[in-house]
Image (cartoon, helix red, strand yellow):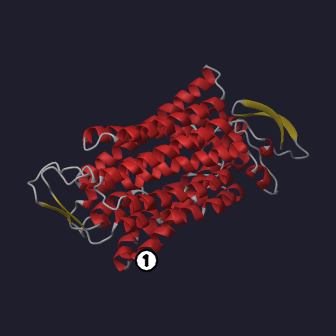
Amino acid sequence: MMRVNLSVAIVDMVNSTRTLEENGTEGTCPFPDGPAGETKQVHGEFNWDGPTQGLVLGCFFWGYMSTQIPAGILAEKHGGKLLFGGGIFLTSIFTLITPMAVRISLKFFIAVRVLTGMAEGVTLPAMHSLMASWIPCNERSTLGSFIMAGMQFGTVVALPLSGLLCEVNIDNGWPLVFYIFGLSGLIWFGFWHTKITDSPENHPAISNDEKEYILDHLGMQKRTKGGTPWYAIFTSLPFWAIFVAHCGNNWGFYTLLTELPTYMKSVLHFDIKSNGFLSALPYLMMWIVANVSSWIADYYRHNRETSVTTIRKTCNSVGTFVPGLALICAVYTGCNAVSTVIFLTIAVGSNGATYSGFQVNHIDIAPNYAGILMGLTNCFANICGFLAPYVVGLITTDEGSIEQWQLVFFISAGIYFVSNTFFLVFSSAEDQNWNRIVETHSTSRPRSFGSIETTSKVE
Protein backbone atom coordinates (compact mmCIF):
# COMPACT_ATOMS: atom_id res chain seq x y z
CA MET A 1 0.00 0.00 0.00
CA MET A 2 2.81 2.43 0.87
CA ARG A 3 4.35 1.89 -2.56
CA VAL A 4 1.31 3.11 -4.50
CA ASN A 5 -0.30 5.81 -2.35
CA LEU A 6 1.69 8.56 -4.08
CA SER A 7 0.17 7.57 -7.45
CA VAL A 8 -3.21 8.95 -6.34
CA ALA A 9 -1.96 11.59 -3.91
CA ILE A 10 0.09 13.28 -6.63
CA VAL A 11 -3.12 14.01 -8.55
CA ASP A 12 -4.19 16.21 -5.62
CA MET A 13 -0.71 17.53 -4.84
CA VAL A 14 0.00 19.05 -8.27
CA ASN A 15 -1.58 22.34 -9.31
CA SER A 16 -3.13 22.08 -12.77
CA THR A 17 -5.50 24.25 -14.79
CA ARG A 18 -7.34 23.31 -17.99
CA THR A 19 -10.01 24.98 -20.09
CA LEU A 20 -13.20 23.18 -21.00
CA GLU A 21 -13.97 23.35 -24.71
CA GLU A 22 -17.24 22.19 -26.11
CA ASN A 23 -15.65 19.30 -27.97
CA GLY A 24 -12.19 19.42 -26.42
CA THR A 25 -9.05 20.60 -28.19
CA GLU A 26 -7.66 18.51 -31.01
CA GLY A 27 -6.18 15.26 -29.77
CA THR A 28 -7.76 15.50 -26.33
CA CYS A 29 -11.00 14.24 -24.83
CA PRO A 30 -13.82 16.67 -23.97
CA PHE A 31 -14.73 17.15 -20.34
CA PRO A 32 -17.92 15.30 -19.40
CA ASP A 33 -19.72 18.49 -18.36
CA GLY A 34 -19.33 22.22 -18.12
CA PRO A 35 -19.77 24.99 -20.71
CA ALA A 36 -17.10 25.84 -23.25
CA GLY A 37 -14.37 28.06 -21.90
CA GLU A 38 -14.95 27.14 -18.25
CA THR A 39 -11.75 26.61 -16.26
CA LYS A 40 -11.20 23.28 -14.50
CA GLN A 41 -8.55 23.57 -11.78
CA VAL A 42 -6.94 21.30 -9.22
CA HIS A 43 -5.59 23.56 -6.46
CA GLY A 44 -2.50 21.53 -5.63
CA GLU A 45 0.44 22.91 -3.70
CA PHE A 46 3.17 22.05 -6.20
CA ASN A 47 3.83 23.25 -9.75
CA TRP A 48 5.48 20.15 -11.23
CA ASP A 49 5.62 19.52 -14.97
CA GLY A 50 5.34 16.05 -16.55
CA PRO A 51 9.02 15.06 -16.35
CA THR A 52 9.19 16.23 -12.73
CA GLN A 53 6.14 14.14 -11.85
CA GLY A 54 7.75 11.16 -13.59
CA LEU A 55 10.91 11.76 -11.56
CA VAL A 56 8.95 11.96 -8.31
CA LEU A 57 7.03 8.76 -9.07
CA GLY A 58 10.10 6.87 -10.26
CA CYS A 59 12.77 7.85 -7.71
CA PHE A 60 11.33 5.32 -5.23
CA PHE A 61 12.73 2.61 -7.49
CA TRP A 62 16.27 4.00 -7.39
CA GLY A 63 16.40 2.94 -3.77
CA TYR A 64 14.21 -0.13 -4.28
CA MET A 65 16.59 -1.75 -6.76
CA SER A 66 19.72 -0.95 -4.73
CA THR A 67 18.85 -3.27 -1.83
CA GLN A 68 17.57 -6.26 -3.80
CA ILE A 69 20.79 -8.26 -4.14
CA PRO A 70 22.13 -7.54 -0.61
CA ALA A 71 18.69 -8.46 0.76
CA GLY A 72 18.68 -11.78 -1.10
CA ILE A 73 22.10 -12.70 0.29
CA LEU A 74 21.17 -11.65 3.84
CA ALA A 75 17.86 -13.52 3.70
CA GLU A 76 19.56 -16.76 2.63
CA LYS A 77 22.13 -16.47 5.41
CA HIS A 78 20.05 -15.12 8.29
CA GLY A 79 16.40 -15.75 7.39
CA GLY A 80 13.70 -13.45 6.08
CA LYS A 81 11.64 -12.58 9.15
CA LEU A 82 13.68 -9.71 10.57
CA LEU A 83 14.63 -8.41 7.13
CA PHE A 84 11.03 -8.29 5.90
CA GLY A 85 9.66 -6.82 9.11
CA GLY A 86 12.45 -4.28 9.39
CA GLY A 87 11.89 -3.19 5.80
CA ILE A 88 8.22 -2.49 6.43
CA PHE A 89 9.02 -0.71 9.72
CA LEU A 90 11.46 1.70 8.04
CA THR A 91 9.13 2.18 5.07
CA SER A 92 6.43 3.23 7.53
CA ILE A 93 8.71 5.77 9.21
CA PHE A 94 9.73 7.33 5.89
CA THR A 95 6.10 7.39 4.76
CA LEU A 96 5.12 9.32 7.90
CA ILE A 97 7.70 12.05 7.26
CA THR A 98 6.88 12.38 3.54
CA PRO A 99 4.49 15.39 3.86
CA MET A 100 7.10 17.30 5.86
CA ALA A 101 9.82 16.41 3.33
CA VAL A 102 7.90 17.50 0.24
CA ARG A 103 7.02 20.84 1.83
CA ILE A 104 10.65 21.51 2.72
CA SER A 105 12.04 20.98 -0.78
CA LEU A 106 11.75 18.79 -3.86
CA LYS A 107 15.28 17.47 -3.32
CA PHE A 108 14.51 16.44 0.27
CA PHE A 109 11.32 14.76 -0.90
CA ILE A 110 13.20 12.80 -3.57
CA ALA A 111 15.78 11.73 -0.97
CA VAL A 112 13.03 10.45 1.34
CA ARG A 113 11.40 8.57 -1.53
CA VAL A 114 14.74 6.94 -2.39
CA LEU A 115 15.17 5.89 1.27
CA THR A 116 11.61 4.55 1.26
CA GLY A 117 12.48 2.46 -1.78
CA MET A 118 15.64 1.15 -0.13
CA ALA A 119 13.65 0.06 2.92
CA GLU A 120 10.93 -1.64 0.91
CA GLY A 121 13.45 -3.17 -1.49
CA VAL A 122 14.42 -5.84 1.02
CA THR A 123 10.88 -7.22 1.32
CA LEU A 124 10.50 -9.30 -1.84
CA PRO A 125 13.80 -11.23 -1.57
CA ALA A 126 13.05 -11.81 2.12
CA MET A 127 9.56 -13.04 1.27
CA HIS A 128 10.90 -15.45 -1.36
CA SER A 129 13.34 -16.85 1.17
CA LEU A 130 10.50 -17.33 3.66
CA MET A 131 8.28 -18.98 1.04
CA ALA A 132 11.07 -21.39 0.10
CA SER A 133 11.33 -22.32 3.79
CA TRP A 134 7.60 -22.73 4.35
CA ILE A 135 5.69 -23.73 1.20
CA PRO A 136 5.74 -27.41 0.06
CA CYS A 137 6.49 -27.98 -3.63
CA ASN A 138 3.02 -29.30 -4.38
CA GLU A 139 1.36 -26.15 -2.99
CA ARG A 140 3.76 -23.62 -4.50
CA SER A 141 1.45 -22.22 -7.19
CA THR A 142 -1.53 -21.78 -4.88
CA LEU A 143 0.13 -20.48 -1.73
CA GLY A 144 2.91 -18.60 -3.50
CA SER A 145 0.43 -16.77 -5.71
CA PHE A 146 -1.89 -16.06 -2.78
CA ILE A 147 0.95 -14.46 -0.82
CA MET A 148 2.35 -12.47 -3.74
CA ALA A 149 -1.11 -11.33 -4.80
CA GLY A 150 -1.45 -9.72 -1.39
CA MET A 151 0.46 -6.80 -2.90
CA GLN A 152 -2.39 -6.25 -5.34
CA PHE A 153 -4.97 -6.54 -2.58
CA GLY A 154 -3.07 -3.77 -0.83
CA THR A 155 -3.28 -1.72 -4.02
CA VAL A 156 -7.04 -2.32 -4.16
CA VAL A 157 -7.33 -0.83 -0.67
CA ALA A 158 -4.74 1.93 -1.12
CA LEU A 159 -5.95 3.58 -4.32
CA PRO A 160 -9.61 4.28 -3.41
CA LEU A 161 -8.74 5.05 0.21
CA SER A 162 -6.12 7.53 -0.99
CA GLY A 163 -8.75 9.18 -3.18
CA LEU A 164 -11.14 9.50 -0.25
CA LEU A 165 -8.47 10.86 2.10
CA CYS A 166 -7.45 13.49 -0.46
CA GLU A 167 -10.97 14.91 -0.25
CA VAL A 168 -10.87 15.35 3.53
CA ASN A 169 -10.66 19.05 4.38
CA ILE A 170 -7.72 18.69 6.77
CA ASP A 171 -4.28 20.00 5.79
CA ASN A 172 -5.27 19.86 2.09
CA GLY A 173 -6.19 16.19 2.40
CA TRP A 174 -3.26 14.49 0.66
CA PRO A 175 -0.91 14.37 3.72
CA LEU A 176 -3.46 12.10 5.42
CA VAL A 177 -2.65 9.45 2.81
CA PHE A 178 0.90 9.18 4.15
CA TYR A 179 -0.02 9.49 7.83
CA ILE A 180 -2.68 6.74 7.72
CA PHE A 181 -0.61 4.24 5.75
CA GLY A 182 2.57 4.92 7.73
CA LEU A 183 0.76 4.35 11.02
CA SER A 184 -0.85 1.16 9.67
CA GLY A 185 2.60 -0.20 8.80
CA LEU A 186 3.87 0.36 12.34
CA ILE A 187 0.86 -1.45 13.81
CA TRP A 188 1.36 -4.35 11.36
CA PHE A 189 5.02 -4.64 12.37
CA GLY A 190 4.01 -5.40 15.97
CA PHE A 191 1.95 -8.40 14.87
CA TRP A 192 4.61 -9.62 12.44
CA HIS A 193 7.41 -9.51 14.99
CA THR A 194 5.49 -11.58 17.56
CA LYS A 195 3.82 -14.17 15.28
CA ILE A 196 6.29 -15.10 12.50
CA THR A 197 9.38 -17.34 12.48
CA ASP A 198 11.98 -17.96 9.77
CA SER A 199 11.13 -21.65 9.36
CA PRO A 200 8.72 -24.35 10.60
CA GLU A 201 11.48 -25.83 12.75
CA ASN A 202 11.33 -23.05 15.32
CA HIS A 203 7.65 -22.14 15.18
CA PRO A 204 6.00 -22.82 18.56
CA ALA A 205 2.40 -23.14 17.38
CA ILE A 206 2.39 -25.84 14.68
CA SER A 207 2.13 -29.57 15.33
CA ASN A 208 5.01 -32.00 14.81
CA ASP A 209 3.12 -33.76 12.00
CA GLU A 210 2.60 -30.48 10.14
CA LYS A 211 6.22 -29.53 10.70
CA GLU A 212 7.47 -32.86 9.32
CA TYR A 213 5.17 -32.62 6.30
CA ILE A 214 6.45 -29.16 5.38
CA LEU A 215 10.11 -30.05 5.88
CA ASP A 216 9.80 -33.26 3.85
CA HIS A 217 8.22 -31.48 0.86
CA LEU A 218 10.23 -28.28 0.57
CA GLY A 219 12.69 -29.41 -2.09
CA MET A 220 15.55 -27.70 -0.32
CA GLN A 221 18.32 -28.61 2.09
CA LYS A 222 20.06 -27.13 5.03
CA ARG A 223 23.43 -26.07 3.84
CA THR A 224 26.73 -25.47 5.52
CA LYS A 225 28.75 -22.33 4.93
CA GLY A 226 29.73 -22.10 1.30
CA GLY A 227 29.77 -19.78 -1.66
CA THR A 228 26.87 -18.96 -3.93
CA PRO A 229 27.33 -20.54 -7.40
CA TRP A 230 27.42 -17.18 -9.19
CA TYR A 231 28.97 -18.46 -12.41
CA ALA A 232 26.41 -21.25 -12.72
CA ILE A 233 23.57 -18.81 -12.07
CA PHE A 234 24.72 -16.30 -14.67
CA THR A 235 25.25 -18.99 -17.31
CA SER A 236 21.84 -20.59 -16.71
CA LEU A 237 19.28 -19.96 -19.48
CA PRO A 238 16.29 -20.66 -17.18
CA PHE A 239 17.61 -17.90 -14.90
CA TRP A 240 17.89 -15.48 -17.83
CA ALA A 241 14.38 -16.42 -18.94
CA ILE A 242 13.07 -15.32 -15.54
CA PHE A 243 15.25 -12.22 -15.70
CA VAL A 244 13.90 -11.07 -19.08
CA ALA A 245 10.30 -11.93 -18.14
CA HIS A 246 10.64 -9.98 -14.89
CA CYS A 247 12.04 -6.90 -16.66
CA GLY A 248 9.37 -6.92 -19.35
CA ASN A 249 6.58 -7.48 -16.88
CA ASN A 250 7.75 -4.67 -14.63
CA TRP A 251 7.82 -2.15 -17.47
CA GLY A 252 4.16 -2.71 -18.29
CA PHE A 253 3.08 -3.18 -14.69
CA TYR A 254 4.78 -0.08 -13.29
CA THR A 255 3.76 2.07 -16.24
CA LEU A 256 0.14 1.41 -15.32
CA LEU A 257 0.65 1.34 -11.55
CA THR A 258 2.27 4.78 -11.39
CA GLU A 259 0.56 6.49 -14.32
CA LEU A 260 -2.99 5.12 -14.42
CA PRO A 261 -4.40 7.72 -11.97
CA THR A 262 -2.77 10.51 -14.02
CA TYR A 263 -4.31 9.07 -17.21
CA MET A 264 -7.71 8.85 -15.52
CA LYS A 265 -7.46 12.52 -14.51
CA SER A 266 -5.82 14.10 -17.54
CA VAL A 267 -7.38 12.14 -20.42
CA LEU A 268 -10.66 10.75 -19.10
CA HIS A 269 -11.24 13.63 -16.64
CA PHE A 270 -12.34 11.63 -13.60
CA ASP A 271 -12.39 13.47 -10.28
CA ILE A 272 -10.10 12.37 -7.43
CA LYS A 273 -12.67 10.12 -5.73
CA SER A 274 -13.73 8.35 -8.93
CA ASN A 275 -10.08 8.21 -9.96
CA GLY A 276 -9.10 6.25 -6.87
CA PHE A 277 -11.92 3.73 -7.19
CA LEU A 278 -11.53 3.22 -10.95
CA SER A 279 -7.74 2.93 -10.67
CA ALA A 280 -8.23 0.24 -8.01
CA LEU A 281 -10.65 -1.82 -10.11
CA PRO A 282 -7.92 -3.36 -12.34
CA TYR A 283 -5.97 -4.46 -9.26
CA LEU A 284 -9.02 -6.10 -7.74
CA MET A 285 -9.29 -8.04 -10.98
CA MET A 286 -5.58 -8.84 -10.80
CA TRP A 287 -5.94 -10.20 -7.27
CA ILE A 288 -8.83 -12.43 -8.37
CA VAL A 289 -6.99 -13.66 -11.48
CA ALA A 290 -3.84 -14.40 -9.47
CA ASN A 291 -5.70 -16.64 -7.03
CA VAL A 292 -7.92 -18.35 -9.61
CA SER A 293 -5.00 -19.04 -11.97
CA SER A 294 -2.95 -20.51 -9.12
CA TRP A 295 -5.78 -22.90 -8.27
CA ILE A 296 -6.09 -23.91 -11.94
CA ALA A 297 -2.31 -24.38 -12.15
CA ASP A 298 -2.23 -26.75 -9.19
CA TYR A 299 -5.33 -28.58 -10.47
CA TYR A 300 -3.66 -29.32 -13.81
CA ARG A 301 -0.48 -30.34 -12.08
CA HIS A 302 -2.13 -32.84 -9.73
CA ASN A 303 -5.10 -34.07 -11.79
CA ARG A 304 -3.94 -33.77 -15.39
CA GLU A 305 -0.26 -34.48 -14.71
CA THR A 306 0.76 -31.37 -16.62
CA SER A 307 4.45 -30.53 -16.19
CA VAL A 308 5.34 -27.56 -14.02
CA THR A 309 7.33 -26.07 -16.91
CA THR A 310 4.24 -26.11 -19.14
CA ILE A 311 2.16 -24.55 -16.38
CA ARG A 312 4.66 -21.75 -15.81
CA LYS A 313 4.87 -20.94 -19.53
CA THR A 314 1.10 -21.03 -19.99
CA CYS A 315 0.35 -18.82 -16.99
CA ASN A 316 3.04 -16.35 -17.96
CA SER A 317 1.68 -16.14 -21.49
CA VAL A 318 -1.81 -15.37 -20.22
CA GLY A 319 -0.32 -12.78 -17.87
CA THR A 320 1.62 -10.93 -20.59
CA PHE A 321 0.11 -11.58 -24.03
CA VAL A 322 -3.43 -10.74 -22.86
CA PRO A 323 -2.34 -7.43 -21.24
CA GLY A 324 -0.42 -6.55 -24.40
CA LEU A 325 -3.48 -7.14 -26.58
CA ALA A 326 -5.72 -5.25 -24.15
CA LEU A 327 -3.41 -2.22 -24.20
CA ILE A 328 -3.52 -2.20 -28.01
CA CYS A 329 -7.33 -2.31 -27.84
CA ALA A 330 -7.28 0.58 -25.33
CA VAL A 331 -5.35 2.63 -27.91
CA TYR A 332 -8.33 2.53 -30.27
CA THR A 333 -11.11 3.30 -27.77
CA GLY A 334 -10.38 7.03 -27.99
CA CYS A 335 -12.48 9.06 -25.58
CA ASN A 336 -14.91 6.25 -24.77
CA ALA A 337 -14.29 6.14 -21.02
CA VAL A 338 -16.25 2.93 -20.40
CA SER A 339 -14.42 0.93 -23.09
CA THR A 340 -11.05 2.32 -22.05
CA VAL A 341 -11.58 1.40 -18.39
CA ILE A 342 -12.69 -2.11 -19.43
CA PHE A 343 -9.58 -2.74 -21.53
CA LEU A 344 -7.24 -1.27 -18.91
CA THR A 345 -8.91 -3.47 -16.29
CA ILE A 346 -8.28 -6.51 -18.51
CA ALA A 347 -4.67 -5.38 -19.11
CA VAL A 348 -3.85 -5.10 -15.42
CA GLY A 349 -6.14 -7.88 -14.20
CA SER A 350 -4.89 -10.63 -16.50
CA ASN A 351 -1.32 -9.82 -15.46
CA GLY A 352 -2.18 -11.63 -12.21
CA ALA A 353 -1.58 -14.94 -13.99
CA THR A 354 2.18 -14.23 -13.87
CA TYR A 355 2.09 -15.06 -10.16
CA SER A 356 1.87 -18.69 -11.28
CA GLY A 357 4.40 -17.97 -14.03
CA PHE A 358 7.82 -16.35 -13.69
CA GLN A 359 7.09 -14.94 -10.23
CA VAL A 360 7.39 -18.33 -8.50
CA ASN A 361 9.80 -19.82 -11.04
CA HIS A 362 12.80 -18.76 -8.92
CA ILE A 363 11.74 -21.31 -6.28
CA ASP A 364 11.23 -24.01 -8.93
CA ILE A 365 14.72 -23.89 -10.39
CA ALA A 366 16.68 -23.28 -7.17
CA PRO A 367 14.80 -23.33 -3.84
CA ASN A 368 18.11 -23.16 -1.98
CA TYR A 369 18.88 -19.80 -3.60
CA ALA A 370 15.36 -18.43 -4.12
CA GLY A 371 16.00 -15.22 -2.18
CA ILE A 372 19.20 -14.48 -4.08
CA LEU A 373 17.58 -15.16 -7.46
CA MET A 374 14.65 -12.89 -6.63
CA GLY A 375 17.09 -10.22 -5.47
CA LEU A 376 18.97 -10.42 -8.77
CA THR A 377 15.99 -10.32 -11.11
CA ASN A 378 14.00 -7.83 -9.05
CA CYS A 379 16.99 -5.49 -8.78
CA PHE A 380 17.40 -5.06 -12.52
CA ALA A 381 13.70 -5.41 -13.31
CA ASN A 382 13.02 -2.42 -11.10
CA ILE A 383 15.19 -0.24 -13.28
CA CYS A 384 11.95 -0.22 -15.26
CA GLY A 385 10.24 1.08 -12.12
CA PHE A 386 11.93 4.45 -12.47
CA LEU A 387 12.57 4.43 -16.22
CA ALA A 388 8.94 3.75 -17.17
CA PRO A 389 7.33 6.74 -15.38
CA TYR A 390 10.19 9.00 -16.48
CA VAL A 391 9.79 7.94 -20.12
CA VAL A 392 6.03 8.44 -19.81
CA GLY A 393 6.71 11.95 -18.51
CA LEU A 394 8.93 12.69 -21.52
CA ILE A 395 6.35 11.33 -23.98
CA THR A 396 3.27 12.97 -22.43
CA THR A 397 4.34 16.60 -22.68
CA ASP A 398 0.61 17.31 -22.90
CA GLU A 399 -0.94 14.99 -20.32
CA GLY A 400 -4.33 15.27 -22.02
CA SER A 401 -3.09 14.15 -25.45
CA ILE A 402 -4.63 10.86 -26.54
CA GLU A 403 -1.94 10.32 -29.20
CA GLN A 404 0.88 10.59 -26.67
CA TRP A 405 -0.76 8.09 -24.32
CA GLN A 406 -1.37 5.74 -27.24
CA LEU A 407 2.40 5.65 -27.80
CA VAL A 408 2.87 4.79 -24.11
CA PHE A 409 0.46 1.85 -24.45
CA PHE A 410 2.06 0.60 -27.69
CA ILE A 411 5.53 0.58 -26.11
CA SER A 412 4.28 -1.38 -23.07
CA ALA A 413 2.46 -3.90 -25.27
CA GLY A 414 5.56 -4.48 -27.40
CA ILE A 415 7.74 -5.07 -24.34
CA TYR A 416 5.19 -7.56 -22.98
CA PHE A 417 5.27 -9.54 -26.24
CA VAL A 418 9.06 -9.63 -26.64
CA SER A 419 9.86 -10.54 -23.03
CA ASN A 420 7.37 -13.40 -22.84
CA THR A 421 8.54 -14.84 -26.16
CA PHE A 422 12.02 -15.15 -24.62
CA PHE A 423 10.48 -16.79 -21.54
CA LEU A 424 8.59 -19.31 -23.68
CA VAL A 425 11.76 -20.37 -25.48
CA PHE A 426 14.22 -20.64 -22.59
CA SER A 427 12.36 -21.10 -19.29
CA SER A 428 12.18 -24.28 -17.22
CA ALA A 429 10.69 -25.30 -13.89
CA GLU A 430 13.16 -28.14 -13.33
CA ASP A 431 15.58 -28.09 -10.45
CA GLN A 432 18.97 -26.95 -11.73
CA ASN A 433 22.16 -28.91 -11.07
CA TRP A 434 23.79 -25.96 -9.34
CA ASN A 435 20.98 -25.91 -6.76
CA ARG A 436 21.82 -29.40 -5.50
CA ILE A 437 24.05 -29.40 -2.46
CA VAL A 438 25.67 -32.67 -1.37
CA GLU A 439 26.89 -32.87 2.18
CA THR A 440 28.95 -35.62 3.75
CA HIS A 441 27.96 -37.59 6.84
CA SER A 442 24.31 -37.57 5.89
CA THR A 443 21.50 -39.93 5.03
CA SER A 444 19.43 -40.16 1.90
CA ARG A 445 15.85 -39.06 1.71
CA PRO A 446 13.74 -38.58 -1.43
CA ARG A 447 12.54 -35.09 -2.06
CA SER A 448 10.52 -33.34 -4.73
CA PHE A 449 11.48 -30.41 -6.93
CA GLY A 450 8.33 -29.32 -8.74
CA SER A 451 7.77 -32.08 -11.28
CA ILE A 452 11.03 -33.98 -10.51
CA GLU A 453 11.83 -36.36 -7.76
CA THR A 454 15.44 -36.77 -6.70
CA THR A 455 17.31 -38.51 -3.95
CA SER A 456 19.60 -36.14 -2.16
CA LYS A 457 21.82 -36.12 0.85
CA VAL A 458 20.39 -34.37 3.85
CA GLU A 459 21.24 -34.33 7.48
x and y percentages locating residue 239 in the rendered image:
69, 46
At 41% from the left edge and 67% from the top edge, which residue is drawn? 56
Amino acid type at image mark 1: Phe
x and y percentages locating residue 271 in the rendered image:
22, 54
Picture quadrant where residue 258 is located: bottom left
At 68% from the left edge and 36% from the top edge, which residue is drawn? 429
Which quadrant, please, contains the N terminus?
bottom left
At 86% from the left edge and 45% from the top edge, which residue is drawn? 438
Instruction: Determine the residue located farthest toward the top in the rendered image.
Output: 304
* Circle 1 residue: 108
x and y percentages locating residue 66 in the rendered image:
59, 65
Query: Under tag 1, what secondary structure?
Result: helix
x and y percentages locating residue 25 in the rendered image:
20, 54
At 49% from the left edge and 60% from the top edge, which residue is drawn? 387
State whether residue 149 appears in this view. Answer: no
Instruction: Determine the residue located farthest toward the left in the rendered image.
Output: 35
